[in-house]
Image (cartoon, rainbow, N blue to C red):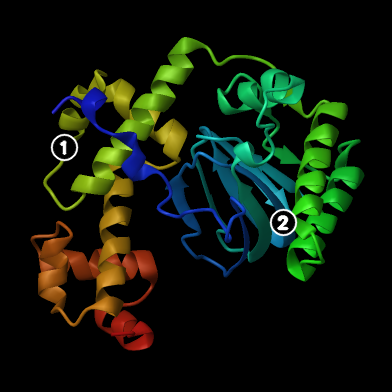
């Protein structure tokens, strides 16, 4: 199978970011210590977030960012990102919205000169804006107003949401939180190939997979593939595959009454003893105890 023929849409975050007729969603996440955080993913929409408490690490387009209270997080469309807390706790607020929500029906200068380049990846933003940044105070105030408007939903609040989002972008440009620079083609190609490999793994994690096979799909040597994958995803490919399998196993443990042996086999483990050890190492508990604590069937 040629990886270029694989649709990358399957690895997009499987969520529709829409509330009614507004292409936008709000998320509050409270991460506990040593949780797996959220896995590597991407979406077509723009995302702005705020660390409301604690500390953690985000991996954005192959770079790690330590984040803490009051940091603002900017995720551009189609950007690979993941996050976790390690031995800390952390909570975040975020809004995910389609830039089409802000574009004019009749193309104007904001659409042509700003939003289209953002969508096309020609305008890139600083992923993390800390309190020491000169524009942080105004950006934070705008974000908090956005949160309040979304929560209270006053009469005609849709206009206010759009006004605040436009003002947020105005502040990003005003305080030079951008780099108007098109990605070098080799970097862009590596990123695209990584997204395609992630798509393939999401669909075939339960099969026997080798590094050589994946490298061949991407058109890379095995060494270049392993280095590129770790750069963008943050962990070695074999470890990522195991995490995919274990996350799916945990889901099936709580949502089905299948035996542990059948679940192990269904996610790609032929040895149930090895599966049990891997599961306990990852989740800190055995499959049996995990099911007992989280049973929802």
- Point out the residue furthest to the bottom here: 292
* Image x and y of residue 219, in percent: 24, 18
Asked which secondary structure carries label 1, the reply is: loop
In depth, the one of 3 and 279 nearer the eye is 3
Q: Quarter-wise, where is residue 217 in the image?
A: top left
Quadrant assignment for the C terminus: bottom left
Q: Position of residue 53 (x, y in %)?
A: 74, 63
Judge from the rendering whether residue 120 lies leftward or rightward of residue 104; answer left or right.
left
Q: Which residue is found at the position 69% from the left and 25% from the top? A: 111
Label 2, label 1: how many angstroms apart (C-alpha)?
38 Å
Q: Nearer the viewer, mark 2 or mark 1?
A: 2
Determine if residue 70 is in view: no
Residue 293's place in the image compared with 133, above or below, is: below
Query: In screen coordinates, is 220 left or right of 90?
Result: left
Give how far across and how far down residue 216 sits, in percent. Answer: 18, 23
Mark identifier at residue 51 = 2
Residue at 44% x, 52% y is 39
Figure quadrant of residue 46: top right
User: Which class describes the residues within 10 Å of circle 1: few (<14), some (14-19), or many (20+)?
Assistant: few
267 to 231, vertically: above or below: below
Q: Residue at x 11, y 46 (%)?
A: 208
Dot 2 crowding, Cα within 10 Å, few <14, some 14–19, many 20+: many
Q: Secondary structure at mark 2?
A: strand
Q: Position of residue 119 (x, y in %)?
A: 58, 28
Q: Quadrant of residue 104?
A: top right
Tell me the quarter of the image containing the N terminus: top left
Identify the residue at horizontal 49%, vertical 38% (top origin): 80
Check the image and report above or below for 262 versus 164: below
Give the residue number, with chain letter if any, for mark 1: 210
Q: Is residue 116 visible?
A: yes
Left or right for 140, reference 85: right
């Amino acid at each position: 199978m040629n990886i270029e023929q694989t649709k990358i849409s399957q690895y997009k975050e499987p969520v529709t970011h829409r509330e009614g007729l507004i292409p936008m969603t709000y998320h509050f996440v409270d991460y506990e210590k040593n949780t797996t955080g959220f896995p590597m993913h991407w979406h077509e929409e723009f995302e702005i977030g705020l660390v409301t408490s604690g500390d953690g690490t985000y991996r954005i387009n192959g770079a790690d960012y330590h984040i803490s209270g009051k940091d603002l997080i900017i995720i551009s469309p189609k950007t690979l990102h993941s996050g976790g807390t390690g031995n800390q706790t952390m909570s975040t607020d975020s809004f995910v919205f389609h830039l089409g929500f802000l574009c004019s029906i009749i193309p104007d200068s904001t659409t042509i000169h700003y939003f289209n380049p953002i969508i096309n990846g020609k305008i890139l933003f600083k992923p993390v804006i800390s309190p020491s940044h000169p524009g942080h105070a105004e950006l934070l105030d705008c974000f908090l107003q956005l949160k309040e408007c979304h929560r209270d939903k006053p009469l005609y609040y849709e206009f206010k949401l759009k006004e605040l989002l436009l003002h947020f972008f105005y502040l990003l440009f005003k305080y030079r939180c951008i780099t108007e620079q098109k990605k070098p083609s080799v970097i862009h190609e590596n990123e695209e190939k990584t997204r395609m490999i992630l798509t393939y793994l999401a669909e075939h994690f339960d099969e026997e997979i080798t590094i050589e096979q994946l490298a061949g799909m991407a058109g890379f040597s095995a060494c270049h593939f392993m280095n590129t994958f770790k750069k963008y995803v943050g962990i070695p490919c074999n470890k990522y595959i195991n995490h995919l399998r274990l996350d799916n196993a945990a889901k099936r443990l709580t949502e089905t009454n299948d035996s542990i042996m059948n679940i192990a086999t269904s996610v790609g483990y032929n040895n149930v003893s090895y599966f049990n050890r891997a599961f306990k190492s990852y989740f800190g508990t055995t499959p049996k105890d995990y099911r007992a604590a989280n049973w929802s069937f």
